Amino acid sequence: MSGSDKNLTEHEGLIGEPLVLEFDNNRLLPELYGEHGKHLSRIEQTLDVSLANRGNQVFVSGQAENCARAEQVLTALYAHLERGAEVTGGDVDGALRLSLGNGAHIGAPQGAGDKNKGKHNGKGNGNSKSNGKKLYGGAALRTQRREVLPRSATQADYIQALLKNELVVGLGPAGTGKTYLAVAAAATMLVEGKVDRIILSRPAVEAGENLGFLPGDMRDKVDPYLRPLYDALYDMLPGPQVARSLESGEIEIAPLAFMRGRTLSNSFVILDESQNATPMQMKMFLTRMGENSRMVITGDPSQIDLPFGAKSGLRDAMEILPKVRGVDIIRFGEEDVVRHDMVTRIVKAYNRRDAKLPDAKQDKKRKKRDGKADEKEAHGDD
Protein backbone atom coordinates (compact mmCIF):
# COMPACT_ATOMS: atom_id res chain seq x y z
CA MET A 1 0.00 0.00 0.00
CA SER A 2 1.29 3.50 -0.76
CA GLY A 3 2.36 5.90 1.96
CA SER A 4 -0.94 7.76 1.70
CA ASP A 5 -2.69 4.50 2.74
CA LYS A 6 -5.57 5.01 0.32
CA ASN A 7 -7.66 1.94 -0.46
CA LEU A 8 -9.12 0.76 -3.71
CA THR A 9 -12.69 1.76 -2.93
CA GLU A 10 -11.65 5.39 -2.65
CA HIS A 11 -10.18 5.22 -6.15
CA GLU A 12 -13.24 3.52 -7.56
CA GLY A 13 -15.30 6.48 -6.34
CA LEU A 14 -13.56 8.77 -8.81
CA ILE A 15 -14.98 9.53 -12.23
CA GLY A 16 -13.80 6.93 -14.73
CA GLU A 17 -11.92 3.72 -14.10
CA PRO A 18 -8.38 3.82 -12.70
CA LEU A 19 -5.42 2.94 -14.89
CA VAL A 20 -4.19 -0.55 -13.97
CA LEU A 21 -0.48 -1.40 -14.15
CA GLU A 22 0.53 -5.02 -13.81
CA PHE A 23 4.07 -6.21 -13.03
CA ASP A 24 5.37 -9.75 -13.49
CA ASN A 25 7.94 -10.13 -10.70
CA ASN A 26 6.48 -9.72 -7.21
CA ARG A 27 9.95 -9.86 -5.64
CA LEU A 28 10.88 -6.52 -7.22
CA LEU A 29 7.79 -4.67 -6.03
CA PRO A 30 8.88 -3.85 -2.43
CA GLU A 31 11.86 -1.94 -3.83
CA LEU A 32 9.70 -0.32 -6.52
CA TYR A 33 7.21 0.89 -3.90
CA GLY A 34 9.88 1.90 -1.39
CA GLU A 35 9.95 1.40 2.37
CA HIS A 36 6.43 2.01 3.73
CA GLY A 37 5.42 3.00 0.18
CA LYS A 38 7.55 6.15 0.20
CA HIS A 39 8.28 5.99 -3.54
CA LEU A 40 4.58 5.74 -4.33
CA SER A 41 3.89 8.64 -1.99
CA ARG A 42 6.51 10.72 -3.78
CA ILE A 43 4.88 10.00 -7.13
CA GLU A 44 1.44 10.83 -5.72
CA GLN A 45 2.64 14.12 -4.28
CA THR A 46 4.51 15.24 -7.39
CA LEU A 47 2.08 14.14 -10.10
CA ASP A 48 -1.16 14.78 -8.17
CA VAL A 49 -2.42 11.22 -8.68
CA SER A 50 -3.70 8.55 -6.32
CA LEU A 51 -1.99 5.15 -6.24
CA ALA A 52 -3.17 1.90 -4.68
CA ASN A 53 -1.48 -1.47 -4.96
CA ARG A 54 -3.04 -4.91 -4.73
CA GLY A 55 -0.78 -7.91 -5.33
CA ASN A 56 1.24 -7.24 -8.46
CA GLN A 57 -1.09 -4.48 -9.67
CA VAL A 58 -1.00 -0.73 -9.13
CA PHE A 59 -4.17 1.32 -9.67
CA VAL A 60 -3.58 4.90 -10.80
CA SER A 61 -6.35 7.53 -10.59
CA GLY A 62 -6.24 11.18 -11.56
CA GLN A 63 -6.08 13.35 -14.64
CA ALA A 64 -5.21 11.55 -17.85
CA GLU A 65 -1.91 13.30 -18.45
CA ASN A 66 -0.72 12.77 -14.89
CA CYS A 67 -1.76 9.10 -14.95
CA ALA A 68 0.29 8.62 -18.11
CA ARG A 69 3.27 10.20 -16.40
CA ALA A 70 2.86 7.95 -13.37
CA GLU A 71 2.73 4.92 -15.66
CA GLN A 72 5.89 6.08 -17.42
CA VAL A 73 7.75 6.60 -14.12
CA LEU A 74 6.71 3.30 -12.54
CA THR A 75 7.40 1.17 -15.61
CA ALA A 76 10.79 2.85 -16.17
CA LEU A 77 11.83 2.21 -12.57
CA TYR A 78 10.57 -1.38 -12.77
CA ALA A 79 12.68 -1.94 -15.92
CA HIS A 80 15.66 -0.55 -13.96
CA LEU A 81 15.03 -3.17 -11.25
CA GLU A 82 14.66 -5.93 -13.85
CA ARG A 83 18.21 -5.20 -15.03
CA GLY A 84 19.50 -5.90 -11.54
CA ALA A 85 19.93 -2.30 -10.39
CA GLU A 86 18.50 -0.69 -7.28
CA VAL A 87 16.02 2.18 -7.06
CA THR A 88 16.82 5.07 -4.73
CA GLY A 89 14.91 8.20 -3.86
CA GLY A 90 17.16 10.08 -6.28
CA ASP A 91 16.20 7.70 -9.08
CA VAL A 92 12.52 8.33 -8.35
CA ASP A 93 13.03 12.10 -8.39
CA GLY A 94 15.03 11.81 -11.60
CA ALA A 95 12.29 9.82 -13.33
CA LEU A 96 9.70 12.34 -12.14
CA ARG A 97 11.81 15.23 -13.40
CA LEU A 98 12.14 13.62 -16.81
CA SER A 99 8.42 12.87 -17.02
CA LEU A 100 7.54 16.48 -16.22
CA GLY A 101 10.28 18.19 -18.18
CA ASN A 102 13.34 20.03 -16.89
CA GLY A 103 11.52 23.10 -15.62
CA ALA A 104 9.47 21.23 -13.03
CA HIS A 105 10.15 21.49 -9.32
CA ILE A 106 10.11 18.02 -7.80
CA GLY A 107 7.75 17.92 -4.85
CA ALA A 108 5.24 20.44 -6.22
CA PRO A 109 1.90 18.87 -7.18
CA GLN A 110 1.09 18.91 -10.86
CA GLY A 111 -2.14 19.26 -12.74
CA ALA A 112 -3.97 21.65 -10.40
CA GLY A 113 -4.43 24.16 -13.20
CA ASP A 114 -5.12 21.74 -16.07
CA LYS A 115 -8.76 22.53 -16.68
CA ASN A 116 -9.10 20.60 -19.91
CA LYS A 117 -7.75 17.26 -18.68
CA GLY A 118 -10.20 14.44 -17.96
CA LYS A 119 -9.96 11.34 -15.84
CA HIS A 120 -7.98 8.38 -17.13
CA ASN A 121 -9.82 5.28 -18.27
CA GLY A 122 -8.32 1.98 -19.32
CA LYS A 123 -5.87 -0.68 -18.37
CA GLY A 124 -2.09 -0.43 -18.67
CA ASN A 125 -0.03 -3.40 -19.80
CA GLY A 126 3.03 -2.79 -17.63
CA ASN A 127 5.26 -2.63 -20.72
CA SER A 128 8.31 -1.63 -18.71
CA LYS A 129 10.89 -1.96 -21.47
CA SER A 130 9.24 0.33 -24.00
CA ASN A 131 8.15 2.92 -21.43
CA GLY A 132 11.52 2.88 -19.69
CA LYS A 133 13.38 3.44 -22.93
CA LYS A 134 11.02 6.26 -23.87
CA LEU A 135 11.49 8.05 -20.55
CA TYR A 136 15.29 7.87 -20.51
CA GLY A 137 15.72 8.20 -24.27
CA GLY A 138 17.95 5.11 -24.27
CA ALA A 139 20.62 7.04 -22.32
CA ALA A 140 22.21 4.89 -19.61
CA LEU A 141 25.73 4.06 -18.44
CA ARG A 142 26.37 0.53 -17.15
CA THR A 143 29.45 0.13 -15.00
CA GLN A 144 30.50 -2.89 -12.96
CA ARG A 145 28.88 -1.57 -9.80
CA ARG A 146 25.79 0.25 -11.00
CA GLU A 147 23.61 1.42 -13.84
CA VAL A 148 23.65 5.20 -14.04
CA LEU A 149 20.49 6.77 -15.44
CA PRO A 150 19.96 10.43 -16.36
CA ARG A 151 18.00 12.46 -13.84
CA SER A 152 17.17 15.37 -16.14
CA ALA A 153 16.77 15.95 -19.87
CA THR A 154 20.09 17.78 -19.98
CA GLN A 155 21.81 14.83 -18.30
CA ALA A 156 20.34 12.55 -20.97
CA ASP A 157 21.79 14.82 -23.69
CA TYR A 158 25.11 14.87 -21.83
CA ILE A 159 25.30 11.07 -21.64
CA GLN A 160 24.57 10.78 -25.36
CA ALA A 161 27.27 13.36 -26.09
CA LEU A 162 29.81 11.53 -23.89
CA LEU A 163 29.23 8.29 -25.77
CA LYS A 164 29.35 9.79 -29.26
CA ASN A 165 31.76 12.74 -29.31
CA GLU A 166 35.53 13.01 -28.98
CA LEU A 167 35.46 16.33 -27.11
CA VAL A 168 32.63 17.32 -24.77
CA VAL A 169 32.36 20.38 -22.54
CA GLY A 170 29.95 20.28 -19.58
CA LEU A 171 29.16 23.67 -18.05
CA GLY A 172 26.92 24.44 -15.11
CA PRO A 173 26.46 24.84 -11.36
CA ALA A 174 27.45 22.38 -8.67
CA GLY A 175 25.32 19.28 -8.22
CA THR A 176 24.29 18.78 -11.85
CA GLY A 177 26.30 15.56 -12.31
CA LYS A 178 28.88 16.89 -14.79
CA THR A 179 31.88 15.10 -13.29
CA TYR A 180 30.01 12.06 -11.97
CA LEU A 181 28.53 11.21 -15.37
CA ALA A 182 31.85 11.82 -17.12
CA VAL A 183 33.59 9.34 -14.78
CA ALA A 184 30.73 6.88 -15.32
CA ALA A 185 31.17 7.14 -19.09
CA ALA A 186 34.93 6.65 -18.70
CA ALA A 187 34.42 3.53 -16.53
CA THR A 188 31.89 2.14 -19.03
CA MET A 189 34.28 2.55 -21.95
CA LEU A 190 37.18 1.07 -19.98
CA VAL A 191 35.15 -2.02 -19.06
CA GLU A 192 33.95 -2.41 -22.67
CA GLY A 193 37.53 -2.15 -23.97
CA LYS A 194 36.90 1.00 -25.99
CA VAL A 195 39.78 2.77 -24.21
CA ASP A 196 42.88 1.41 -22.49
CA ARG A 197 43.05 3.85 -19.59
CA ILE A 198 41.32 6.66 -17.75
CA ILE A 199 43.11 9.90 -16.94
CA LEU A 200 41.46 12.29 -14.48
CA SER A 201 42.89 15.73 -13.85
CA ARG A 202 42.16 18.90 -11.92
CA PRO A 203 43.98 22.22 -11.48
CA ALA A 204 45.46 22.21 -7.96
CA VAL A 205 44.33 25.74 -7.23
CA GLU A 206 44.04 26.96 -3.66
CA ALA A 207 40.61 28.26 -2.69
CA GLY A 208 41.40 30.04 0.56
CA GLU A 209 43.71 27.22 1.70
CA ASN A 210 47.50 27.06 1.50
CA LEU A 211 48.81 24.01 -0.34
CA GLY A 212 52.34 24.38 0.98
CA PHE A 213 51.31 23.92 4.58
CA LEU A 214 49.58 20.58 3.98
CA PRO A 215 51.56 17.64 5.42
CA GLY A 216 53.32 14.96 3.35
CA ASP A 217 54.93 14.74 -0.06
CA MET A 218 53.55 16.17 -3.31
CA ARG A 219 51.01 13.36 -3.76
CA ASP A 220 49.76 13.80 -0.20
CA LYS A 221 49.39 17.54 -0.84
CA VAL A 222 47.38 17.25 -4.08
CA ASP A 223 45.24 14.20 -3.21
CA PRO A 224 42.66 16.27 -1.25
CA TYR A 225 42.03 18.32 -4.40
CA LEU A 226 41.39 15.14 -6.41
CA ARG A 227 39.27 13.34 -3.82
CA PRO A 228 35.93 13.88 -5.66
CA LEU A 229 37.38 11.98 -8.63
CA TYR A 230 38.38 9.06 -6.38
CA ASP A 231 34.89 9.02 -4.85
CA ALA A 232 33.25 8.81 -8.27
CA LEU A 233 35.57 6.01 -9.36
CA TYR A 234 34.80 3.89 -6.31
CA ASP A 235 31.09 4.37 -7.04
CA MET A 236 31.55 2.90 -10.53
CA LEU A 237 34.11 0.11 -10.08
CA PRO A 238 34.91 -2.45 -7.35
CA GLY A 239 37.40 -1.12 -4.80
CA PRO A 240 40.12 -3.76 -5.44
CA GLN A 241 39.96 -3.10 -9.18
CA VAL A 242 40.33 0.65 -8.65
CA ALA A 243 43.35 0.06 -6.39
CA ARG A 244 44.98 -2.27 -8.93
CA SER A 245 44.26 0.09 -11.82
CA LEU A 246 45.72 3.05 -9.94
CA GLU A 247 48.83 1.01 -9.17
CA SER A 248 49.26 -0.17 -12.78
CA GLY A 249 48.51 3.19 -14.36
CA GLU A 250 45.35 1.98 -16.09
CA ILE A 251 43.64 4.72 -14.08
CA GLU A 252 45.67 7.86 -13.48
CA ILE A 253 44.68 10.83 -11.34
CA ALA A 254 47.02 13.80 -11.58
CA PRO A 255 47.10 17.60 -11.27
CA LEU A 256 46.76 19.47 -14.56
CA ALA A 257 50.36 20.71 -14.40
CA PHE A 258 51.58 17.10 -14.82
CA MET A 259 49.95 16.85 -18.28
CA ARG A 260 52.52 19.04 -20.07
CA GLY A 261 54.53 17.36 -22.82
CA ARG A 262 52.39 14.21 -22.99
CA THR A 263 50.37 12.64 -25.82
CA LEU A 264 47.32 10.84 -24.45
CA SER A 265 46.29 8.03 -26.82
CA ASN A 266 43.62 5.33 -26.35
CA SER A 267 42.46 7.21 -23.27
CA PHE A 268 39.38 8.76 -21.73
CA VAL A 269 40.64 12.06 -20.31
CA ILE A 270 38.63 14.27 -17.95
CA LEU A 271 39.56 17.77 -16.82
CA ASP A 272 37.44 18.68 -13.81
CA GLU A 273 37.03 22.15 -12.26
CA SER A 274 38.39 23.59 -15.50
CA GLN A 275 37.32 27.11 -14.56
CA ASN A 276 40.46 27.19 -12.39
CA ALA A 277 42.81 26.48 -15.30
CA THR A 278 44.67 29.37 -16.93
CA PRO A 279 44.27 29.97 -20.68
CA MET A 280 47.74 28.51 -21.31
CA GLN A 281 46.97 25.43 -19.22
CA MET A 282 43.69 24.92 -21.08
CA LYS A 283 45.42 25.14 -24.47
CA MET A 284 48.09 22.72 -23.23
CA PHE A 285 45.43 20.24 -22.07
CA LEU A 286 43.38 20.41 -25.27
CA THR A 287 46.45 19.69 -27.39
CA ARG A 288 47.29 16.49 -25.45
CA MET A 289 44.66 14.47 -27.35
CA GLY A 290 46.07 11.45 -29.20
CA GLU A 291 44.56 8.73 -31.37
CA ASN A 292 41.38 6.98 -30.21
CA SER A 293 40.97 9.31 -27.25
CA ARG A 294 38.01 11.07 -25.67
CA MET A 295 38.23 14.31 -23.74
CA VAL A 296 35.71 15.84 -21.36
CA ILE A 297 36.02 19.28 -19.79
CA THR A 298 33.75 20.15 -16.87
CA GLY A 299 33.46 23.36 -14.93
CA ASP A 300 31.35 26.07 -13.35
CA PRO A 301 32.25 29.55 -14.65
CA SER A 302 30.61 31.11 -11.56
CA GLN A 303 33.08 29.46 -9.13
CA ILE A 304 36.51 30.65 -10.23
CA ASP A 305 39.26 30.44 -7.57
CA LEU A 306 42.03 32.03 -9.63
CA PRO A 307 43.70 35.22 -8.32
CA PHE A 308 41.69 38.40 -8.84
CA GLY A 309 42.04 39.69 -12.38
CA ALA A 310 43.32 36.41 -13.84
CA LYS A 311 41.32 35.11 -16.81
CA SER A 312 39.81 31.65 -16.56
CA GLY A 313 40.97 29.14 -19.14
CA LEU A 314 37.40 27.82 -19.35
CA ARG A 315 36.00 31.22 -20.27
CA ASP A 316 38.83 31.70 -22.74
CA ALA A 317 38.12 28.29 -24.30
CA MET A 318 34.43 29.09 -24.61
CA GLU A 319 35.35 31.97 -26.89
CA ILE A 320 37.12 29.52 -29.20
CA LEU A 321 35.64 26.01 -28.95
CA PRO A 322 32.10 26.84 -30.19
CA LYS A 323 33.73 27.64 -33.55
CA VAL A 324 35.47 24.24 -33.73
CA ARG A 325 33.55 21.54 -35.59
CA GLY A 326 33.02 18.31 -33.62
CA VAL A 327 32.99 19.89 -30.16
CA ASP A 328 29.76 19.28 -28.20
CA ILE A 329 28.98 21.80 -25.47
CA ILE A 330 26.30 20.89 -22.92
CA ARG A 331 25.04 23.65 -20.63
CA PHE A 332 23.39 22.71 -17.33
CA GLY A 333 21.10 25.07 -15.45
CA GLU A 334 19.80 25.41 -11.92
CA GLU A 335 16.88 23.12 -12.86
CA ASP A 336 19.38 20.28 -13.45
CA VAL A 337 20.71 20.22 -9.87
CA VAL A 338 20.16 16.66 -8.61
CA ARG A 339 21.52 16.96 -5.09
CA HIS A 340 19.37 17.87 -2.09
CA ASP A 341 16.46 20.23 -2.83
CA MET A 342 18.22 22.78 -0.66
CA VAL A 343 21.09 22.93 -3.18
CA THR A 344 18.63 23.87 -5.93
CA ARG A 345 17.17 26.63 -3.77
CA ILE A 346 20.63 27.94 -2.89
CA VAL A 347 21.76 28.03 -6.54
CA LYS A 348 18.57 29.85 -7.52
CA ALA A 349 19.05 32.39 -4.72
CA TYR A 350 22.62 33.13 -5.83
CA ASN A 351 21.51 33.43 -9.46
CA ARG A 352 18.75 35.89 -8.53
CA ARG A 353 21.20 38.00 -6.55
CA ASP A 354 23.86 37.92 -9.27
CA ALA A 355 21.32 38.86 -11.95
CA LYS A 356 20.67 42.14 -10.12
CA LEU A 357 24.33 43.21 -10.17
CA PRO A 358 25.14 45.88 -12.80
CA ASP A 359 28.09 43.93 -14.25
CA ALA A 360 25.95 40.81 -14.60
CA LYS A 361 23.41 42.60 -16.79
CA GLN A 362 26.10 43.90 -19.11
CA ASP A 363 27.79 40.48 -19.18
CA LYS A 364 24.49 38.82 -20.07
CA LYS A 365 24.00 41.17 -23.02
CA ARG A 366 27.56 40.59 -24.18
CA LYS A 367 27.22 36.78 -23.95
CA LYS A 368 23.97 36.88 -25.92
CA ARG A 369 25.59 39.00 -28.61
CA ASP A 370 28.74 36.83 -28.75
CA GLY A 371 26.65 33.64 -28.83
CA LYS A 372 24.80 34.79 -31.94
CA ALA A 373 28.09 35.71 -33.62
CA ASP A 374 29.64 32.34 -32.71
CA GLU A 375 26.64 30.51 -34.10
CA LYS A 376 26.90 32.33 -37.42
CA GLU A 377 30.63 31.59 -37.65
CA ALA A 378 30.09 27.92 -36.78
CA HIS A 379 27.54 27.56 -39.57
CA GLY A 380 29.98 29.27 -41.88
CA ASP A 381 32.72 26.71 -41.02
CA ASP A 382 30.38 23.83 -41.85
Image (cartoon, rainbow, N blue to C red):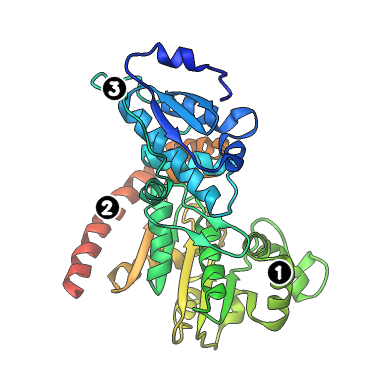
- The answer to whether residue 279 shows anywhere in this view is no
For badge 1, the amino acid type reads Val
Q: How many marks?
A: 3
The residue wearing badge 1 is 222
The residue wearing badge 2 is 368
Residue 25: image location, x then y, percent:
55, 43
Q: Say whether disc 2 or disc 1 marks the residue closer to the N-terminus.
A: 1
Q: Nearer the viewer, residue 184 or 142?
A: 142
Mark 2 or mark 1: which is in front? 1
Label 3 SS = loop
For badge 2, the amino acid type reads Lys
The residue wearing badge 3 is 114
Mark 3 or mark 1: which is in front? 3
Residue at x 53%, y 37% (from the top left corner): 346
Residue at x 23%, y 21% (from the top left corner): 116
Q: Nearer the viewer, residue 202 or 330?
A: 330
Q: CA distance from mark 2 to mark 3?
A: 34 Å
Q: CA distance from mark 3 to mark 1?
A: 54 Å
Contact? badges 3 and 1 (CB < 8 Å): no
Q: Say whether disc 3 or disc 1 marks the residue closer to the N-terminus.
A: 3
For badge 3, the amino acid type reads Asp
